[in-house]
Amino acid sequence: MAVHTVATPVALGPAVGLSCRECGERFDLGPIFACAVCFGPLEVAYDLPTGDPEALRRRIEAGPENIWRYAPLLPVPADVADKPSLNPGFTKLVKADNLARELGVTGGLYVKDDSGNPTHSFKDRVVAIAVEAARAFGFTTLSCSSTGNLAGAVGAAAARAGLKSCVFIPHDLEAGKVVMAAVYGGDLVGIEGTYDDVNRFCSELIGDPLGEGWGFVNVNLRPYYGEGSKTLAYEICEQLGWRLPDQIVVPIASGSQLTKIDKGLKELIALGLVEDRPYKIFGAQAEGCSPVSRAFKDGHDVVRPVKPDTIAKSLAIGNPADGPYVLDIARRTGGAVEDVTDAQIVDAIKLLARTEGIFAETAGGVTVGVTKKLIEAGVLDPSLTTVVLNTGDGLKTLDAVAPTTGPSATIRPSLDAFRAAGLAGS
């Protein structure tokens, strides 16, 4: 099979090219995202380190406490840790014993809490990788289509890297996400319509002279951007003592995060860094935007687009690009894809906050809510080690819980009034 070459090849660590996920056609590294032969999606292909797994493990453990400890496994230059970056990653893996008791989990329950990243969502990971690709390809403006978190991550990363930024969002996002995307000084443009409308607009802009010199992290830089999600798999396994979790529950927006976590787990197995044994991956969606869940339950291999209507706006992608691959992974690993209502999302946000002191955004409520639902249905095994992802900070989605959350009481400043309120502390 011929390899399609580009005019000016670049070097990005162990990455050796791009490979079509459908037909296997190979391309040199470049700012392309679709196969020229079959129009399938491209992903990064590697020549990963071989040899002594123990030596590689020690090298990783000696690295910085961020995603650059995994630079030998990522499409980034060897000196990436020395460049201006927000240095995301290596967030906490919280052993959630209180939540486990509430849900009846006996095999160990963990929350991978990515709200600790610089802009308080997992998007800092994927953007950090995309920035390195943008630098390599000579882009001067960083851009994206976003449901909110990505817009903030791009704005912050571009500011740190000394790049311009212009990001595009649906016009009706949560106020907190709009402010966080705008505060970094780049251009923020609201588009009248859904995220899918925004994404289509960005695809058109790439082909227009207006978009010349622009790196769209989730379009023409998408193969590199997606690789950042692998670091979630790397960290979870390292933080578990270099072992695979038995079960992992991942929120689904485009589906890329779930597919790349699976890719990361398979790479760790191939490198001998973890023992090869079965694991299950479960996908989580909001009922108001659940095309992948519906396809899974109906036994379909394709995903029918929907119009989103949910409080979980960070997951509100009605036509998820990686949906068919999510279905393959869920079925191959023995997992499932499930959804929960908006009311169940709010309940799950409060449950996680009450039991573990973690205030998740709506996407985290989706994963916790789906975990609870799967346990109750007998689909997720409570006797196995389970990891649940929280991908963002609840301060970004205050509107979701504000109507049902507030002071326990409002009283006069006296002990008698406090006693009369009948609170637990009195």
Image (spheres, rainbow, N blue to C red):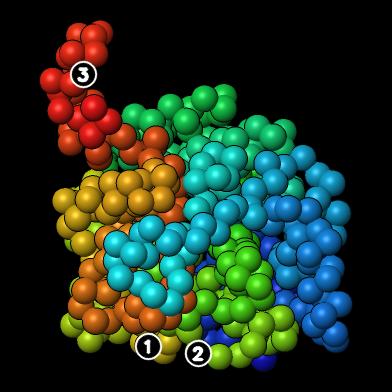
- Measured Cα–Cα span from mark 1 to mark 2: 9 Å
Query: Which residue sits at x=45%, y=72%?
Result: 108
In the rendered image of this protein, does residue 236 appear above or below residue 381? above
Question: First in sequence: mark 3 or mark 1?
Answer: 1
Query: Which residue sits at x=50%, y=46%?
Result: 115
- Contact check, label 1 and label 2, Cβ < 8 Å: yes
Q: Which residue is mark 2?
A: 278
Circle 2: residue type: Pro
- Measured Cα–Cα span from mark 3 to mark 2: 55 Å
Q: Which mark is residue 334?
A: 1
Estimate the x, y position of residue 28 in percent, counting from the top left: 72, 72
Q: Which residue is mark 3?
A: 418
Looking at the rendered image, the quarter that the C terminus falls into is: top left
Left or right: 155, with 199 as reference point: right
Circle 1: residue type: Gly
In the rendered image of this protein, does residue 142 appear above or below residue 200? above
Camera-near label (3 vs 1) is 3
Estimate the x, y position of residue 197 in percent, counting from the top left: 31, 49
Estimate the x, y position of residue 309 in percent, counting from the top left: 18, 51
Q: Secondary structure at mark 1?
A: loop
